[in-house]
């Protein structure tokens, strides 16, 4: 049960990290495929676009919380668990923090 919480937190952090990326296209792409008749008349040329990607800063920590945990039967009892805590700073804001 506890491992499931960490796995879900990891998936959530990865999803948030992808959403928070700052992507800037730095070069246009070009694809020219070879043209063929009976013989090759032109060489192929492929230039892929280039990207600079600034990923967000993601801090995953833990903290102690007391929660109601159901037990077998008709009662619950308090139990202290370590739960994940995720903080995401979008890429643009992380750069701003460095400049200060």
Image (cartoon, rainbow, N blue to C red):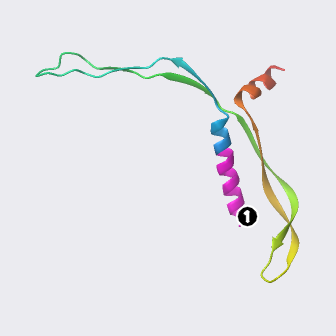
Query: Residue drawn 66% across and 39% down?
Result: 17
Quadrant that contains the N terminus: bottom right
Q: Main secondary structure of the magenta part?
A: helix
User: How many numbered tags mark residues here?
Assistant: 1
Q: Hey, which quadrant is residue 80 in on the image?
A: bottom right
Which residue is nearer to you in this view: 98 or 30? 30
Q: Hey, which quadrant is residue 91 in on the image?
A: top right
Q: Is residue 20 above or below residue 78?
A: above
Q: Residues within 10 Å of mark 1 (few under 14, many from 20)?
A: few
Residue 10, given in percent of the width and then of the height, sits at: 67, 50
Quadrant that contains the C terminus: top right
Q: Which residues fall within the magenta stretch?
A: 1-14
Q: Which residue is mark 1?
A: 2
Q: Hey, which quadrant is residue 90 in on the image?
A: top right
Query: Residue drawn 69% across and 62% down?
Result: 3
Residue 58, given in percent of the width and then of the height, sits at: 73, 39
Query: Residue drawn 29% across and 22% down?
Result: 33
């Amino acid at each position: 049960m506890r491992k499931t919480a960490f796995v879900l937190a990891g998936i959530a952090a990865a999803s948030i990290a992808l959403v928070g990326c700052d992507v800037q296209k730095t070069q246009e792409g070009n694809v020219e495929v070879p043209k063929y008749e009976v013989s090759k008349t032109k060489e192929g040329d492929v230039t892929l676009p280039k990207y600079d990607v600034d990923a967000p800063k993601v801090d995953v920590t833990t903290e102690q919380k007391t929660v109601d945990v159901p037990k077998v039967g008709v009662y619950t009892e308090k139990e202290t668990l370590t739960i994940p805590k995720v903080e995401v700073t979008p890429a643009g804001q992380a750069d701003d923090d460095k400049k200060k």
